[in-house]
Image: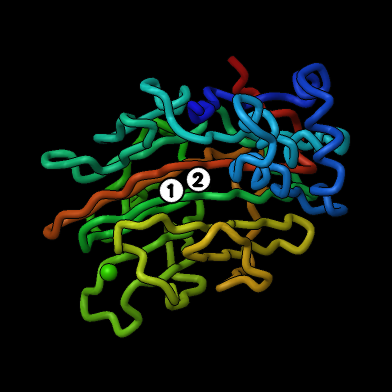
Amino acid sequence: MKKPMVRWVLFTSSVLLAACRVEVSLGVEAQGGAAPGLGGGQGGSSGTNGGSNAGVGGNAGVGGNAGVGGNGFRFAGFDANCNGLVLSGGATCREDRLLLDPGPDENKGGAYLRCRVPFGAETAFESRLVFIAEGEADGLAFVVHADARGPGTIGTAGGALGYGQLSEGYAVQFDNLDSGDPLGDRVEITDIETMRLAVAEAGILLDDGSPNFAWISYDGSAKELSVRLSKIDSRPSSPLLSASIDLASLDPQGAYVGLTAAYGAIAGLHSVLEWEMAFTGLAAPLDCVE
Ligand SMILES: [Ca+2]
């Protein structure tokens, strides 16, 4: 059976309400109180919803949050247009994947949502990311920034992972370069202008060419960002690392959310297989609907 391709599926609550009862019925359980849930999304990706509807079912967790003002998106693969994401550097999509730093001349790239995400004081999100790292350098990052140059701006390459020299924001970096760092492959939460806020050994080999599953969770009420990581598609109960940050303080208009990757002297490739986010408590609906 052909794998369902979810194209540009960024949507608003109103679209969701009209879209599919299945989403709501499956999404209620995934809602889990104030925190956004991706439980339905995982069900969809495992194919339990069956056939061509799996992708729709995959949005169930997001749909379940529609009633509390949440919304989000799910890319269960990437079409030739990269699902309408704003690309920079060498980022491109082929064979259902988003290749951020495809080389040989393109050693960095980014892919961002077109609109600012209106983070408010009560905003929470969970983002599930499935990616592959090949080669030894350098890493992939989940980035939230409010740089006035916008979502099409790429930062510096190498260890800066394509977000270096951007202003005002945070990155979760999955760094697979073993450059004498005793931690080897590691995960960091970083203020992109100033400093490392938290770091942990990945605990898995990020660059063995097999999928890495990451869950990035944010709770605006607690002002905390947490990261979970696994080699299997099963969300660990405990975070690998957390840091105290406040995304609502970045810019009243909101912040850009995207993925970047880069390498430097040593080659590497970072490919994204799936990416989804579910929000609750946004200050305004997402404004990226096509
Ligand atoms: Ca490595």
- Where residue 214 appears, as percent x and y from the top left, is 52, 58
Which quadrant holds the C terminus? top right
- Where residue 244 appears, as percent x and y from the top left, is 64, 67
Q: 55 or 144: nearer the eye?
A: 55
- The relative height of residue 144 versus residue 199 in the rendered view (above or below) is above
Q: Are marks 2 and 1 in contact (CB under 8 Å)?
A: yes
- Amino acid type of disc 2? His
Q: Is residue 189 left or right of residue 102?
A: right
What label sits on residue 145 in the rendered view? 2
Examine the image and state in which quarter residue 41 appears.
top right
Q: How is the image coloured?
A: rainbow
- Amino acid type of disc 1? Ser
Q: Earlier in the sequence, mark 2 or mark 1?
A: 2
The residue lying at 57 percent from left, 50 percent from top is 128
Q: Is residue 278 left or right of residue 212?
A: right
The CA distance from mark 2 to mark 1 is 7 Å
Nearest to viewer (mark 2 / mark 1)? 2
What label sits on residue 41 in the rendered view? none
Residue under numbered circle 1: 167
Residue 36 visible in the current orientation: yes
- Where residue 175 appears, as percent x and y from the top left, is 35, 64
